[in-house]
Every structure is written in C-alpha cells, then in structure tokens.
C-alpha cells in the first residue's frame, strides 16, 4: 500500500478549539432562527388555512375577549372540565368581543361529548356563559371549529344509535350559528348524513 504524499486533512485530527468553533457557529444559527419568526398576522393566516381557529378582525380587536378558563360552564363533570378550543369574535356587532369555547368533561380516556358555549364579560364583571350552541347532552363531538365575521362554524360528529361504538361516529353535520335579533340562529351546510371514514 502506498501512503499519500498529501498532508493530513485538518478534519482528521480535530482539536477542542475546532469543536468549540463549531458549537459557537451552531448557537449563532439557532439564535438567528429564533429572531426570524413570522409575525402574528402570518401565523394566524397559516392556522386558518389548516382548519385552526380563526379570529375576527375589526373593532373587537381593541377590546380584550373574555378568558374561558375559570368560567362556570353548565356541565356536571365529576373530574372537572376541559376547554378544548376557544376563539374570540364580535358576535352581536356591539364592538366588544365575546369568546366561543368548545368544552367537554375531563376524561382519562375516550372522547367525551362536547359543548359549544358563548362567553361574555360585562365591564368589571366575571366572564359568564350567555348561550349554549351545542349541549353535551346531544352527545356530539366538535371538530373544524372557527369564529369568523360574526359566525361560529363547526363540524359536529354524532351517532345514529346507541349500538354505534363511541369511538366511531357515523353521522356528520356542518353547522353554523349567527346572532340575529336576540338569539343565535343555527344553519346547516351541505354535509352528508354519514361520517364514514372520519
């Protein structure tokens, strides 16, 4: 075997100073990546494109929407409740935002039925539920939840009978609610009657 006439390459005999230089360069790249995050408007737009929560823009953005944590929801849950999702929006057009919350009983396993509630907070008062759009007694699960332009939208998954396993809903409904006059009016979309493959 013939030995190389070329000098040894630097990377074949790394010294601690080389490792320190590499670690410093990597730390600089990570720090720079942390500073170059997208602004809030871009992040919100991306979330809405993927079926995430969408908030309403306009005069309501200057006021603070009620925080659904700590609200006394009309649920009878031995282990407490979970706010699975929430979004603010000016639903009644008064310039002040409400919060719409998807809530279910806390469960160690399984998928407990959800409720959709509208929470408001009068000036100086604690937040409170003012409307129930979906009652957990209906035994529905909520997906694709959004609040946009004064309208609450969600996909509701349900069961055609008690014989259907609770893991596998077989009914699907696209529903939306909008404040008209003095009540939330529900309308349903063109979804099919079954949720096969959901």
Image: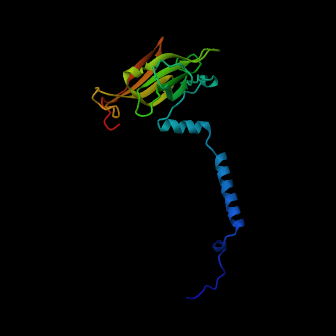
Q: Quadrant of the N terminus?
A: bottom right
- Tell me which corner region of the image, top left, top right, bottom left or bottom right, holds residue 60: top right
Q: Residue furthest front?
A: 78
Vertical comparison of 11 with 47: above or below = below
- x and y percentages locating residue 56 in the rendered image: 55, 27
Vertical comparison of 47 with 183: above or below = below
Q: Quadrant of the C terminus?
A: top left
- Tell me which corner region of the image, top left, top right, bottom left or bottom right, holds residue 109: top left
Coloration mode: rainbow
Vertical comparison of 4 with 15: above or below = below
- Tell me which corner region of the image, top left, top right, bottom left or bottom right, holds residue 164: top left
Q: Residue furthest right?
A: 17
- x and y percentages locating residue 47 in the rendered image: 52, 37
The residue nearer to you, when weighing 144 against 142, is 142
Vertical comparison of 33 with 80: above or below = below
- x and y percentages locating residue 136 in the rendered image: 41, 22
Instruction: Decide if residue 53 is on the left or right side of residue 36.
Output: left
How many discs appear? 0
What residue is shown at x 41% (from left), y 19% (from top)? 186
The residue nearer to you, when weighing 12 against 6, is 12
Q: Residue furthest bottom?
A: 2
- x and y percentages locating residue 42 in the rendered image: 58, 39
């Amino acid at each position: 075997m013939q030995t190389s006439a070329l000098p040894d390459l630097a990377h074949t005999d790394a010294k601690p100073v080389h490792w320190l230089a590499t670690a410093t360069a990597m730390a600089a790249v990570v720090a720079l990546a942390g500073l170059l995050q997208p602004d809030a408007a871009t992040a919100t737009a991306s979330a809405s494109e993927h079926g995430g929560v969408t908030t309403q823009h306009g005069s309501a953005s200057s006021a603070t929407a009620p925080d659904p944590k700590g609200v006394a929801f009309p649920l009878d849950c031995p282990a407490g409740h979970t706010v699975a999702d929430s979004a603010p929006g000016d639903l009644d057009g008064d310039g002040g935002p409400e919060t719409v919350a998807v809530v279910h009983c806390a469960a160690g396993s399984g998928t407990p039925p959800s409720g959709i509630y509208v929470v408001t907070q009068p000036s100086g008062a604690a937040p409170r539920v003012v409307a129930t759009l979906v009652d957990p007694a209906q035994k529905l699960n909520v997906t694709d939840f959004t609040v946009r332009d004064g309208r609450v939208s969600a996909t509701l998954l349900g069961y055609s009978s008690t014989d259907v396993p609770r893991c596998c809903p077989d009914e699907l409904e696209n529903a939306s609610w909008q404040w008209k006059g003095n009540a939330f009016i529900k309308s349903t979309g063109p979804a099919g009657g079954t949720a096969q493959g959901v």
